[in-house]
Amino acid sequence: MSMTLQDLVSALPEVYQPIYGHAEWNQEASRDCNERLLIINKQYDALAKTLDRPLRVLDLGCAQGFFSLNLANRGATVTGIDFLQENIDVCRALAQENSNLDVNFTIGRIEGTIQHLNPDDYDFVIGLSVFHHIVYQHGIPQVKEWLFKLADSVKLMVLELAVKEEPLYWGEAQPNDPRELIEQCHFYHQVASFPTHLSDISRPMYFVSNGYVALGDFCQPFLQWYDNPYSADRNIHKGSRRYYFSDEYVCKIFQHKSVNGQLTEVEGKRNAAELKAEAEFLSCSSLPDMTTPKLFLSDESETESWLVMERLPGNLLMERLKNKENIDYESLFSQILKQLVELENIGLYHDDVRSWNIMISDDQQVNLIDYGSISNAKKDCAWPGNIFQSFFILVNEIFLPEQARTAFIRPVMISPFKLPRLYANWLYAFWKVPQAEWSFGLLNDLFHDKENLFEFDELASGSESWIAAQEQMMVFEQEKLKEVESKLNNLINAVTHLDHRFSTALEHSNQQLDVYRDELKNKFVLLKQSVPEQITSLSEQLISSLDQAKKELEQRLQLTERTVDNLTSENAELQKIENRINNSTSKNLELHQCELRRIEEEVQRLASENIELQRCELQRIEQQLEKLAAENASLQEAERKINKLTEENIVLQQQTQAILSSRSWRMTAGYRYVGLQIHLLRKFGAIQRGKHLVKRVLNKAFSFLRSHPRMKIFVINLTHRTGLYPNAVRVYQRLNPAHRACQQDIIQQHSHLERQLEVRDDLPPEVNEIYQKIKK
């Protein structure tokens, strides 16, 4: 045993796994990994056998490398990833001890490893009890996306997933069902569950793949998979069933509890019972007229049941009808009836004889499938319940596929009256037999004798014709319901589209509101900026006043200190005087005592005056502070009023704008104008309003003439010829006094120029010379 390895193991935060090749540390391991190793080794061997080569393995969260080194010992090329340096150091030391193994350990994170993973880099991936930490950090949707990418990049992965019920800090972040993390992958199968060292709650282990079915020793690729048994299935099994197909096998996995929780307990029990019944039938069936596939394996657990069987050649009858392929109806019904009779002879019945449970090969060999629907119960699994009436519907579906396709589940087509004549005679003859005597044996005998039967329309009674008419009406109603369903789907799509448009419009409106809000905020900020400036100015004044008061108080204190110093010196002087008095004669004692009392009184008077002055000054300062505080409060109140008035102003502007842009405001414009004119007529009288009207008309006319010079010249010439020009000028000047004043200014300027031209001595010599030349 290497001391270096001893040191590395001692440095581990936790010995989570057994140390490979060192049994002496097994007791220190937190978890016993041998049970899980047996399952992983078995699945590794199955996949390696299928691929016929050793596998490339990726161990995500390899810890101390127990699984990596054991798989490398089986011939695998292994890469281990862990984010703890201490774990990687131990793994590398163990790899050096076992240099014959093809194993490599790298420090890294699982998220980055998956993101940079390329398809076919690895065959086999292990991820044991690591993804709950990633769910806690990145959330369920992101981990689902990474796991699907991982399943797409490798052939098979083994996952051990933590559950929400575990009492740890990351528990609440986990999905309600751990299968929710892998339900998007094509294949997943719970192989076992194991306890942990953290709690008594076990963690499930799954095999997950997007291309392989992995069920114990059976590990084979699949070509197609569906969660519905046929294309027309309307999710009646609520996603609890999965079907996998290759050229050689068919695999069925039925859940007892669905991931979404929609599956009821009764439906879960039916899933388990059907698959168990199918396995039992296939394992002991040896009917000569019924070809059954070979059963490869079947089993069940607490959570699911599974079965793998041989794939029979051919296609479903439903698909052939849909593609309108040629079908030999005689051979088809003959073979179906022969198999149903053979089952009936041993007391068994198929309760789901449908077009999707009948397989037809290229050489027209017909086989019933869905063997889990075979039991000793003589009833159908759905409406109408009667197993023979259900067969009548099947015959109608085969001959009238277009009408049958309009139904939701099964068409209301039991009567034989719309079938081809021979087949109608056949089913009608069976119909006339008492129901207690109905059997597939009788139905088969009548089928082979149908050419000798009576014509159904000669024997049909009125009640039977009435039944046929009612059935036709019900089929018509089913067609209408189908149309309603189609319209409803279209309506749902339209509503979804409108919802998208509304969401887009709402988003645009929100953006506009954000713009308006930003504008209002900017205005409000500008408004607030002006108010704080005033507050700042007052605050500065307040601070200045306080500083001044402080300085005055300091001066007073200095004065008081000087007074105290003076008093102290006077007291010292008094002490001297007292000493002199004590040394003086008794004659002067009384005189000195009187003087001493006078001095003491003076000192007390000065001290009381000083105290009074200080008290008055303090009161004055307190009053100033109270006054400034009141002014500050009034400023704050003013600011609140300004904010309130601003908000009210914005509301009023919005209301005013809404009123002005409203349809009613535009519609009542004429009424408002008429009302205004009536009000003015009552206020000023008819004469004043008439003058006002004439004035407005004349102003309009003069304005029109000013903007149309040719018309203006024509009107002036016309008024000259008619002699109305002076009157028109007076009216114009009266209406435009400013224009008249301007004309007077122009006339004065012209007269001034004329006087200058008459008396040219005032003109400059250059101008006078030019004028003389022009005049000549």
Image (spheres, grey):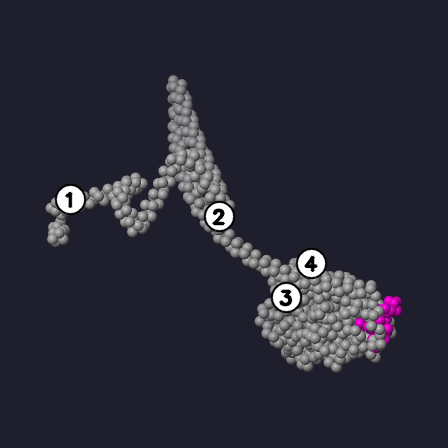
| Distance between the alpha carbons at the discs numbered 2 and 3 | 54 Å
Q: Residues within 10 Å of mark 4 (few under 14, many from 20)?
A: few
Position of residue 594 measured from the top left corner of the image (x, y, whole percent)? 40, 20
Q: Nearer the viewer, mark 4 or mark 1?
A: 1
Q: Amino acid at mark 3?
A: Lys
Q: Which residue is mark 3?
A: 144
Q: Amino acid at mark 1?
A: Arg
Residue most extreme to the front = 722
| Distance between the alpha carbons at the discs numbered 1 and 2 | 63 Å
Position of residue 666 measured from the top left corner of the image (x, y, whole percent)? 48, 46
Q: Nearer the viewer, mark 4 or mark 3?
A: 3
Q: Which residue is mark 4?
A: 167
Residue 755, labelled with which disc?
Answer: 1
Q: Which residue is mark 2?
A: 661
- Nearest the viewer among 461 and 304 is 461
Q: Earlier in the sequence, mark 1 or mark 2?
A: 2
At mark 4, the secondary structure is: loop
The quarter of the rendered structure image containing the N terminus is bottom right
At mark 3, the secondary structure is: helix
Residue 727 in the figure: left or right of residue 764: right
* Residue extent of the magenta highlight: 423-448
**Magenta stretch containing residue 618, yes or no?**
no
Residue 712 in the figure: left or right of residue 465: left
